[in-house]
Image (cartoon, rainbow, N blue to C red):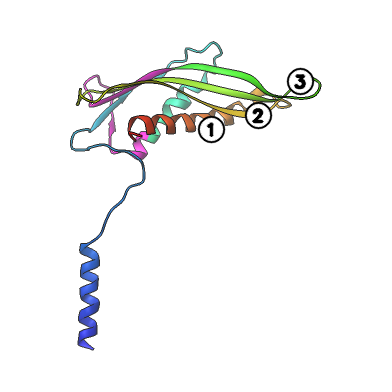
Amino acid sequence: MIKRIFLILALAVVSQACSISYTFNGAILDYSIYKTIAVSNFPIRAALVYAPLQSMFENKLQDLITRQTRLSIVDSSNTDLRLEGEITGYALSPQAVTEDAYASQTRLTITVRIRYINNKNPDIEDIDQTFSAYGDFSSDQLLIDVQDELCDQICDELCDLIFNATFGNW
């Protein structure tokens, strides 16, 4: 009986001492070096403009960085990392055509150009890249009826792409 209690206690101690921690958020950052990031405004430079898009995108990007990293977002030019850019495209295009030559599907595509600057380590190359994502909707719907939902989904996808390209080092 005493051997059994000793064995259980020994297993409990060993299992506590040998715990392994994994994180699956995708961020590869050395938090002893990187503590702050500045996320600039992303003005709309597209031919078509949907005014709420800028704040929607900026908020989603900042929320993702806050949730997935331990970086502090600050409004300063003296930060460890910097993320800036602009929304360069907001376009509609027909995708599927019916037999009477009318579009049955329309695609909304949003394009964002980002610049990711590492102020702490000049050996690491900065990123200057363009990302696009899209959502399709039926042409019998008006854009105004689906615009908020589509922009929300597209911004989520864009933020994931940007996060993986910058913090994920994919």
**Residue stretch in magenta:** 65-86
In percent of width and height, residue 84 lies at: 35, 20
Could you tell me if the residues under marks 3 and 2 are in contact, i.e. CB atoms within 8 Å? Answer: no
Tell me where residue 47 appears, x and y as whole percent: 54, 10
Q: Which residue is mark 3?
A: 102
Which residue in the rendered view is the most extreme toward the right?
100
Q: Residue at x 43, y 34 (%)?
A: 160
**Helix, strand, or loop for circle 3?**
loop
Q: Which residue is mark 2?
A: 137
Residue 25 visible? The answer is: yes
Label 3 vs label 2: CA separation?
14 Å
Q: Amino acid at mark 1?
A: Gln
Q: Residues within 10 Å of mark 1 (few under 14, many from 20)?
A: some
Front tag of 3 and 2: 3
Magenta stretch encompasses residue 39: no
| Residue occupied by mark 1 | 153
- Amino acid at dot 3: Tyr
